[in-house]
């Protein structure tokens, strides 16, 4: 009987065990992808729950022991803990600038400068105030940037001699250096500017877009700067800068009782004990 040649195994056809193992790996991959998507969804939900409500652009932050104020292009928001927020109904729903000296928060909206120490009652400091950015100064004064002029308002509401503003029209942030009434820092898209002679001369000390600026209340040589890339720190009055642990797009800085706070474009307040490390988001 002639021999029948044996059929060679088809190389394209994997043995049953190998096929089964391949199916198992596909299942594992799908499970990993599903788990990853679920984790991302949970993290996204957490961020949304802890975010400052609304969609108006954030302009500034003020912190006192009783809580936080955030000024936006569409009004004022307040929170006792940085986690739960309400709109301030007694403030016009228009661009609002806020600032704090650690004890009192100040609000400028609709041409009226107000102050509060409890986030509930807002007393009028002065009316007919024109400006876009405010900052607390020595002796209870408030500095108001309006174009290329800086107005100074005394604690009783009267106006003091103004300062010549920086050579930039788009002021985004301002801070007074320590107890020196003629030393001012101004942040703008074009960088950070400083005067030490009441505005007679200005020097650009940094070219990075500067959206928020804070002078450490305990050390006037220590300056925190909010930028699109995070918070920068100078320990020598602005001569040298280095990056802190806060790497979010920062739009507001404030300090209270030795602690530092930042509010970011993602609408979350962060806190740090030293302004350098340990930045923690205030979320549920």
Image (cartoon, helix red, strand yellow):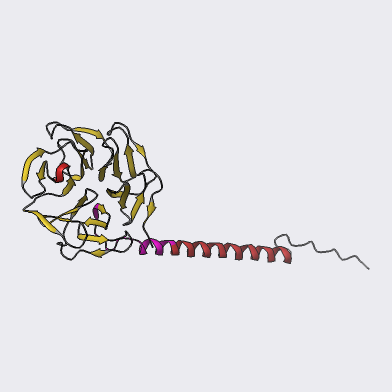
Residue 180 higher or lower than 53, as above or below: above
Q: Position of residue 199 (x, y in %)?
A: 13, 35
| Residue range (magenta) | 43-61
Taking the spot 17% from the left edge, 48% from the top edge, the residue there is 133
Q: Is residue 275 magenta?
A: no
In the image, farthest residue toward the bottom: 1
| Position of the N terminus by quadrant | bottom right
Q: Position of residue 17 (x, y in %)?
A: 73, 65
| Position of the C terminus by quadrant | bottom left
- Does 37 sit left or right of 65 as displayed? right
Q: What is the total number of numbered labels drawn onto the structure image?
A: 0
Q: Position of residue 106 (x, y in %)?
A: 18, 53
Q: Quadrant of residue 151?
A: top left
- Does 52 sit left or right of 135 as displayed? right
- Does 46 sit left or right of 16 as displayed? left
Front residue of 256/211: it is: 256
Q: Is residue 52 magenta?
A: yes
Taking the spot 17% from the left edge, 41% from the top edge, the residue there is 138
Front residue of 270/216: it is: 216
Front residue of 196/103: it is: 103
Q: Quadrant of residue 220?
A: top left
Q: Position of residue 283 (x, y in %)?
A: 37, 60
């Amino acid at each position: 009987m002639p021999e029948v040649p044996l059929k060679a195994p088809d190389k394209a056809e994997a043995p049953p065990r190998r096929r089964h193992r391949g199916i198992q790996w596909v299942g594992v991959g799908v499970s990993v992808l599903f788990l990853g998507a679920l984790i991302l969804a949970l993290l996204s939900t957490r961020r949304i729950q802890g975010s400052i409500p609304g969609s108006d652009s954030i302009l500034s932050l003020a912190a006192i022991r009783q809580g936080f104020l955030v000024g936006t292009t569409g009004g004022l928001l307040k929170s006792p803990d940085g986690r739960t927020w309400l709109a301030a109904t007694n403030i016009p729903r228009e661009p609002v600038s806020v600032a704090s000296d650690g004890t009192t928060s100040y609000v400028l909206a609709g041409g009226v400068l107000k102050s509060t120490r409890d986030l509930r009652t807002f007393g009028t400091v002065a009316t007919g105030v024109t400006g876009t950015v405010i900052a607390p100064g020595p002796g209870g004064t408030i500095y108001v940037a309006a174009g290329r002029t800086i107005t100074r308002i005394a604690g009783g509401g009267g106006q003091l001699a103004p300062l010549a503003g920086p050579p930039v029209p788009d002021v985004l942030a301002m801070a007074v250096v320590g107890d020196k009434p003629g030393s001012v820092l101004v942040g703008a898209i074009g960088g950070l500017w400083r005067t030490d002679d009441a505005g007679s001369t200005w020097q650009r000390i940094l070219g990075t877009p500067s959206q928020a600026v804070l002078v450490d209340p305990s050390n006037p040589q220590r300056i925190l700067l909010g930028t699109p890339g995070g918070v920068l720190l100078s320990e020598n009055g602005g001569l040298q800068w280095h990056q802190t642990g806060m790497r979010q797009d920062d739009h507001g800085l404030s300090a209270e009782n030795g602690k530092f706070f930042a509010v970011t474009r993602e609408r979350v307040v962060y806190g740090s004990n030293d302004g350098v490390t340990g930045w923690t988001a205030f979320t549920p």
